[in-house]
Amino acid sequence: MAATAAILAANAAAAHEFTAALYMTGEMREARLAEAVNGFLLAADERDGHSDETSDGHLGGVDVQVLPLPVAAAGRVSGLVGTPRNPPGVVVVFGPGPEPADLDPDSVVLRPGALPDSWASPDRAGSFAARYRDAYGVMPTVAAAQGYNAARRLDLAIRPLDGITPRAGLISALGETDSGVDWQEALR
């Protein structure tokens, strides 16, 4: 009976968390991967974050663990506290290159999507650029904005599903935000 309760508790916890791999392609992968992770973490902390987290943040009210890939490019990544699982439930592919050939067929693949025109503007109080600068001490790069955008898209897709399943529902919801997300609206 105790073993059954432990299995059910573990399955419930696993259902309310997921791993998002951030996979960087192209030139200057180390710097761009670290920037994309920072943008992703900013978004994962904004709506549902809290102190003493054991995950890397929350998207859609669900714990997210971040797995920076490829491992050879993850040297500059910092600020991760979670325990990502492999294979990841979601793989965000950044850059012009193709998707990694060794992806798990059950992983949902996501490209960051279209960025808002004003993403780099620090002029507005509370803008993404101002929040990023406050969090990291520098202005955001395109990679940081793409990481943030990918996380915002995941947040919007996951929230009504309360997780990343059903897979078809997640893919459909992500498709609805491919052409853009209102970052200010996503904070409400």
Image: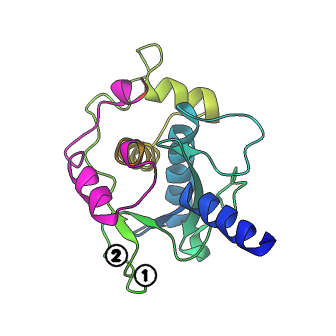
Residues 122 and 184: in front is 184
Q: Which quadrant of the structure image shows residue 81?
A: bottom right
Q: Pointer 1: residues within 10 angstroms few (<14), some, or many (20+)?
A: some
- Answer yes or no: is residue 107 visible: yes
Residue position for label 2: 99
Disc 1 and disc 2 in contact, CB within 8 angstroms: no
Q: Is disc 2 placed on a helix, strand or loop?
A: loop
Q: Can residue 155 be found in the magenta stretch?
A: no
Residue position for label 1: 104
Position of 45 relative to 14 (above/below): above
Position of 8 relative to 86 (above/below): above
Q: Pointer 2: residues within 10 angstroms few (<14), some, or many (20+)?
A: some
> Which quarter of the image is occupied by the N terminus?
bottom right
- Answer yes or no: is residue 75 visible: no
16 on left or right of 156: right
- Magenta residues, start to end: 160-186
> Which quarter of the image is occupied by the C terminus?
top left
**How far across and down, in percent of the image, does residue 17 sit?**
57, 56
Of circles 1 and 2, the one toward us is: 1
Instruction: Pick out the residue farthest to the front.
Output: 1
Determine the residue positioned at 41% across, 14% down: 124
Q: Can residue 177 be found in the magenta stretch?
A: yes
Under mark 2, the amino acid is Glu
